[in-house]
Image (cartoon, rainbow, N blue to C red):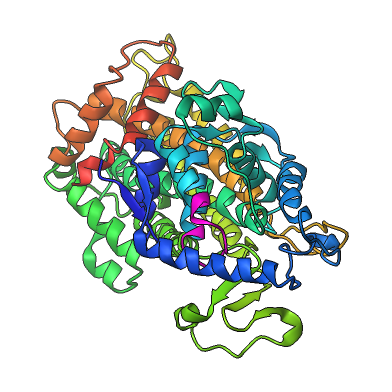
């Protein structure tokens, strides 16, 4: 793939996936390199002039009043990385860690962090040569950013800690760098705090979850349309006039999708003049529910795109020649800035705080829980003989001798109920850290880890509905569903044959979940 040139300003979420999953190469943009060098000159001048500035010539957190100078500055960089690499739990996946590395490099590329370009170049080299730090998933409270996860990333840059090989096995970072012919870094003033201060842990996990969720909501329209047709539901509720009267963008889009998906169905024509007036909410209100999920995803994407191209460490460096890039705000008060008047300002603030990201991670978790919930309710209508409009009980050939989809509905119910627990917002919590200096935090990393599980649960619940809907459509032969839904049915049948008697189904669910994740069901919309 063509190399991605990062500059801190225009990285897309799709490019994050390409680097994280498809191993697209990454390089620092030449113009961004010049901006990085200008900011570094400000830090060098501050150190040379023995000025006081947080985390450059002082300790960090509650120890910010302790002065650091001379050779201690370099020693503090190592100490800061080592002391903050305190994560526990299962490591992040290789893709999540690679996303985190790219996001950190991109943020540093904006030219407000004061690091040497060598820091960014090394991160890019590690990405390009497949060196992946081992980053434990737990230990971040989401402000001063994701300190522990990012410290494990930084640990690998200096040749310490552990990395993951392509099979996920742990090896020493020194050995991983040696194999890849990447030279370990010796960190200089401010570089340690710039590496560990930021939201890239929660953001990396969150972006991959968001991209997966966007595929899920398209797939939900397809699977929901299959279920509606199998239950001999009506498409009247998707009439464009209804949705123009309440024109939420997501609602309009899902209604349009459902009209397209159901067009030309022989099953629909077979009962057009029946006595039933309207369908249950789980069928009739798909535009309103799926559409609200779509609108949530749109908001989450907007926030994550902004965060992806933001400077999120502390303090930030504003070279004199770069002041125009950040607007015309009032000058900092003397006690808030380290003044190197000929070169620029170094300002302490709180851009590392994960609250904006934490909120949308929680919002996305709530939305996906609803998407799984309505899927399970449609599944119930497919399998329950009092609701399934003439389909065999539990979609079982020879019901009684065979149990059919009786237990899969129980599994879906378990997944949906687990989501309800996981959807409790992490961001409403806070806990005081660092001697009460860091007294209000976001819990964004916890929100991202919960969201991962909700994405998996939702995909699995939808896979069960998809398998059941395909089974139900088979019972209605020789009547055919629409051509769009025949395409979706064929994608399911490519990995899962019709169930003509009871069999072990868990592998079917896993294969259909992979079909959903790949976008092959969502392709029925194209």
* Horizontal relation, residue 293 to residue 93: left or right: left
Question: Is residue 153 found left or right of 525 in the rendered image?
Answer: right
Identify the residue shown where x is 39% and y is 30%. Answer: 513
Quadrant of the rendered structure where residue 378 is? top left
Question: Which residue: 47% across, 78% down?
Answer: 322
Residue 217 sits above or below residue 469 on the image: below
Question: What's the residue at 42%, 40% (across, down)?
Answer: 20
Mark count: 0
Q: Is residue 23 visible?
A: yes
Residues 67 and 200: in front is: 67
Q: Horizontal and vertical percent for residue 139?
A: 72, 43
**Relative horizontal placement of residue 232, taking residue 502 as reference (left or right):** left
Q: Is residue 109 magenta?
A: yes
- Location of residue 501 by image quarter: top left
The answer to whether residue 212 is magenta is no
Looking at the image, is 236 positioned above or below residue 137? below
- Above or below for 42 versus 393: below
Left or right of 60, for residue 181: left
Q: Magenta part mainly helix, strand or loop?
A: loop
What percent of the width, then of the height, locates residue 45?
63, 71
Whether 389 is drawn above or below 331: the answer is above
């Amino acid at each position: 793939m063509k190399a991605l040139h990062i500059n801190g300003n225009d990285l897309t979420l799709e490019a994050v996936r390409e680097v994280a999953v498809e191993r697209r190469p990454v390089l620092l943009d030449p113009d961004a390199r010049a901006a990085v060098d200008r900011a570094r000159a400000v830090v060098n001048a501050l150190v040379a002039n023995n000025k006081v500035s947080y985390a450059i010539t002082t300790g960090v957190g509650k120890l910010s009043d302790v002065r650091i100078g001379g050779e201690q500055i370099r020693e503090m960089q190592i100490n800061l990385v080592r002391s903050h690499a305190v994560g526990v739990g299962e490591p992040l996946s290789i893709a999540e860690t690679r996303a985190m590395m790219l996001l950190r490099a991109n943020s540093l590329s904006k030219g407000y962090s004061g690091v040497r370009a060598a820091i960014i170049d090394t991160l890019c080299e590690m990405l390009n040569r497949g060196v992946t730090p081992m980053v434990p998933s737990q230990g971040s409270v989401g402000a001063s950013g994701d300190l522990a996860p990012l410290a494990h990333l930084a640990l690998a840059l200096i040749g310490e800690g552990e990395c993951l090989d392509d099979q996920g096995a742990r090896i020493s970072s020194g050995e991983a760098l040696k194999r890849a012919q990447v030279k370990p870094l010796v960190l200089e003033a401010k570089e340690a705090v710039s590496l560990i201060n930021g939201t890239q842990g929660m953001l990396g996990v969150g972006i991959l979850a968001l991209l997966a969720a966007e595929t899920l909501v398209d797939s939900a329209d397809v699977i929901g349309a299959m279920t509606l047709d199998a239950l001999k539901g009506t498409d009247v509720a998707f009439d464009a006039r209804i949705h123009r009267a309440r024109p939420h963008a997501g609602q309009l889009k899902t209604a349009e999708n459902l009209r397209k998906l159901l067009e030309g169905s022989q099953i629909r024509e077979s009962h057009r003049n029946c006595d039933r007036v309207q369908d249950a909410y789980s069928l009739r209100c798909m535009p309103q529910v799926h559409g609200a999920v779509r609108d949530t995803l749109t908001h989450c994407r907007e926030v994550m795109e902004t965060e992806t191209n933001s400077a999120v460490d502390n303090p930030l460096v504003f070279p004199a020649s770069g002041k125009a890039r950040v607007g015309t705000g009032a000058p900092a008060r003397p006690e808030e800035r380290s003044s190197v008047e000929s070169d620029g300002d170094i300002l302490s603030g709180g851009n590392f705080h994960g609250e904006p990201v934490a909120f949308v991670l929680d919002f996305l978790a709530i939305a996906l829980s609803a998407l799984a919930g309505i899927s399970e309710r449609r599944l119930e209508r497919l399998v329950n003989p009092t609701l399934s409009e003439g389909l065999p009980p539990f979609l079982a050939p020879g019901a009684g001798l065979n149990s059919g989809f009786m237990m899969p509905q129980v599994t879906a119910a378990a997944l949906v109920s687990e989501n309800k627990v996981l959807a409790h917002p992490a961001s409403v919590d806070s806990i005081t850290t660092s001697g009460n200096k860091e007294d209000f935090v976001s819990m964004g990393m916890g929100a991202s880890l919960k969201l991962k599980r909700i994405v998996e649960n939702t995909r699995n619940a939808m896979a069960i509905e998809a398998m059941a809907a395909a089974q139900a459509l088979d019972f209605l032969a020789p009547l055919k569903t629409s051509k769009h839904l025949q395409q979706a049915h064929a994608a399911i049948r490519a990995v899962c044959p019709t169930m003509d008697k009871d069999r072990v189904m868990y592998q079917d669910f896993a294969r259909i979940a992979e079909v959903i994740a790949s976008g092959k069901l969502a392709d029925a919309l194209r």
